[in-house]
Amino acid sequence: MVVIGTSAGGVSALEKVIGGIEEPLNYAIAIVIHVSPDIESGMVKLLKNYTSLPVSEPCDKELIESGHIYIAPSNYHMMIERDGSFSLNLGPKEHYCRPSINVLFETAAESYLDGVTCILLTGANSDGAEGVRAIKSLGGVTIAQDPKEAQVAVMPQSGIDTGDVDHIFL
């Protein structure tokens, strides 16, 4: 499982990441991008321009499939359950955000242990830093965008500042 988190400037960063994926894909990708709950994000349609992989917003209790890209629905935390399904909820905002990158990263770490890789991209707050720490503590691989290359450096830098980022790229 690969989990990706981003916010301000995330569309262009996701274009690079998603556009660079070689197919076929033997893992799933789950993405949280901070968008206003009042605006239909259009992220599914947008990301379909960069890949031939299936891209969708998951339904609650939907089983995760390899070779699929999932985008968190606006205003819902997207969690990964140990049975290999998604759970969506309206829990409290984290870092003023729902969906929260931390929620996705932390639940992915608990479910996939050392079988999860996270990528923390551009953004204007520190959502994702605790999730990076959780993934690293359970044996997963952690990656952050180079803050110098990010449109907004705060988010990837907050992940790097944990001391738990394995690789810096983009």
Image (cartoon, rainbow, N blue to C red):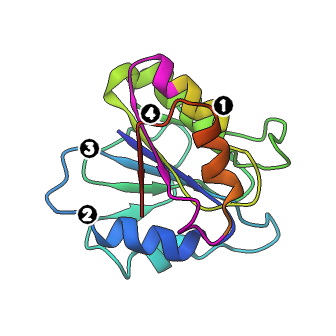
First in sequence, mark 2 or 4: give its number: 2
Q: Is residue 135 in view from this perspective? A: yes
The answer to whether the residues at label 1 and label 4 have Cβ atoms under 8 Å apart is no
Q: Secondary structure at mark 1?
A: helix
Alpha carbon separation for disc pair 4 and 3:
14 Å
Q: Is residue 140 above or below residue 4?
A: above
Q: Which residue is mark 1?
A: 130
Q: Which residue is mark 3?
A: 27
Quarter of the rendering containing residue 112: top left
User: 167 or 130: which is nearer to us?
Assistant: 167
Q: Is residue 2 above or below residue 123?
A: above
Q: Which residues are magenta?
A: 135-151
Horizontally, is 115 left or right of 138 in the view?
left
Alpha carbon separation for disc pair 2 and 4:
23 Å
First in sequence, mark 2 or 1: give its number: 2
First in sequence, mark 1 or 4: give its number: 4
Q: Secondary structure at mark 3?
A: loop
User: 70 or 8: which is nearer to us?
Assistant: 8
First in sequence, mark 2 or 3: give its number: 2
Alpha carbon separation for disc pair 3 and 1:
23 Å
Q: Which residue is mark 4?
A: 85
Q: Residue at x 47, y 25 (%)?
A: 136
Q: Position of residue 4 (x, y in %)?
A: 49, 50
Was residue 136 drawn as part of the magenta stretch in this picture?
yes
Q: Which mark is residue 21?
A: 2
Q: Secondary structure at mark 2?
A: loop
Q: Position of residue 78 (x, y in %)?
A: 60, 42
